[in-house]
Image (spheres, helix red, strand yellow):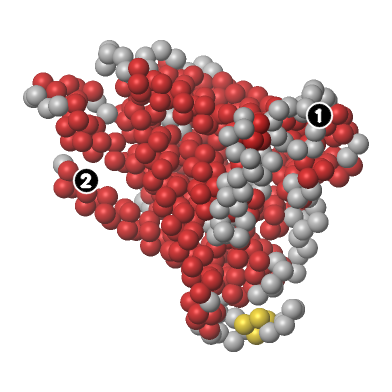
Amino acid sequence: MFQAWRNIYSKSDNAKAYSLLSPALFLIILVMLIPMALMLSFSSFTQVSMMEIDFTPTIQRYIDFFEKSLLVSLLIKSVKISFIVTLITLLTAYPVCYYIAFYVKKNKMLWLVLLTLPFWTSYLLRVFSWKIILGTKGVFNSTLLGAGIISEPLTFLMYSEEAVIITLTHAWAAFALLPLYVSLEKIDFSYIEAARDLGLSKFEVFWKVTFPLSLPGVIGAILIIFIPTVGDYVTPALIGGTEGRMLSNMIQAYFGKINNIPLGAASATIMLTTVILITVIVSYTTKRLTQRLS
Amino acid sequence: MNEKNSSLLIYTLIYFGFLYIPVLFLPIFSFNDANYMSFPLAGFTTDHYEEMWSKRNLHKALWASVKVGVVASVVSTAIALLAAKAFVRYKFRGQNVSYGAIMMPFLIPEIILAVSILIIWINLGFPLGLVPVTIGHILFCTPFAMLILIARIEGFDFSLEEASRDLGENAWGTFYRVSLPLYLPGIIAALLLSFIISFDEFILAFFLSGSDATLPMYMWNQMRFVKKLPHVLALGAVIIVFTTFIVLLAFWLRNVGQGKEKQDIAIKL
């Protein structure tokens, strides 16, 4: 009996694969999916007092969210900031990846290690370094003051949306560089040569051949930057001030000093829904776009 | 393409400058003899580094981060190794869904992971501290470790394992004597990189650590006080040097014993 069971077991790749996967899937279910489901149910409760929560289901927290113009505007601002950051990161990183994929011949490996290295150093410290640069008594202001170009420190550098955008563009660069490079590197060079032989100009070759073929990397980069930056907390908290505040900062406040866990859970759920919607839209439009281009 | 493109080269170098220069200000100002981080530099000092020796809370936070990092990297690498083997070795139903599910913590905004774990943890009546932080870090490190391990064991000749089984070695013996030595560089790379991710992780620690600060939490708490900034800079500089060293070691290990072509594939992950 045991022998027979063993034989079936060893024949089935499904069973073998899932026994290997079971710890990872357990981890995802126990530490991510169940807690997220609980977060969802908490968003339907009511905070009565500091310690007390009323567990009667209601959609009132979602109504609260959309009735508070601050929360809605922070959600819109978070999406807007992430959108701009994603766009700038893509536009600035693409040429770099293009250069390494097509022009660098020797030590490509070294170039890539150097590109990814800053990503591994502490996120907190990378953000903090921009505080040193943009601060009232920071590098930028003290240099300009010292050179006599300005007489008063420029205060708008720090604690603004622009400061948050610059910092995020820097902090998330590696996430655009890797997928872009991988997709550009994969391109079969004979396609590009064929297009040139057919008499297409450099510009046409890029728009009609290279760019469409690199689209998977572009999509990868968009998702991998856009989704996490919508929920970024550190940068707006350190660099943003009141002007550059994002939705995460409010979510943190609901779980911290404001102590309204249901509303915090509802805000987090709305953030997650927004992120999922955007992922679906991006995947759908790019699928359509690839079909049209090819 | 054999032609050169000097304008693109110049742009690429400027971009590298944009990536690296901001981070370099930390070590520069950590040796500066002043409380403010501004030019011109006030003079050279190692005081800020010496100050670190006397900070009891810093030592406590460092020890907390090391503990969390070691446990999180060992557990997540073990989980990731099994999962990576399943994806490389077998074709099975639900493969893409499982892969997507395991990669999710890498993509979802971290604050959402943090608040969901916070809600379940406090409602189970458990105290905040390093335990929930470690659990969160295991969740967060596993997809990274899995990516690294998949890259390493892709193209691995599984007939070696089968041969060992046919020769009468049991499953553990095969793993210990055949698979492990071949996977080892990848495993160490995954351990080192997950340790670094856990060591630098802030958001989960911020929500879940309670009063047991990890090193990033310690730095966060000190950043509010101008007078305490210089020794945070010194600490930051040490951390940057330490992480860079570990990451380079991991990159090197990941490529040990692999052909040139395989190296190019490995680096893409």
Residue A10 percent location from the top left of the image = 44, 43
Mark in the foreground, 2 or 1: 1
| Crowd tier of the residue under label 2, counting other residues whose Cα lies within 10 Å: few below 14, some 14–19, many 20 or above | few
Chain for numbered disc 2? A
* Residue type at tag 2: Thr
Tell me the quarter of the picture where residue B26 sits.
top right
B165 over B143 or under it: above or below: above
Q: Which mark is residue A105?
A: none
Report the side of B126 relative to A56 (left or right).
right
Q: Quadrant of the N terminus of chain B?
A: top left
Report the side of A199 relative to B99 (left or right).
left
Residue at image location 72% in from the left, 36% down from the top: B37
Q: Which mark is residue B33?
A: 1
Judging by the rendered image, the residue that carries numbered circle 2 is: A290
Q: Secondary structure at mark 1?
A: loop
Residue B27 visible to the viewer: no
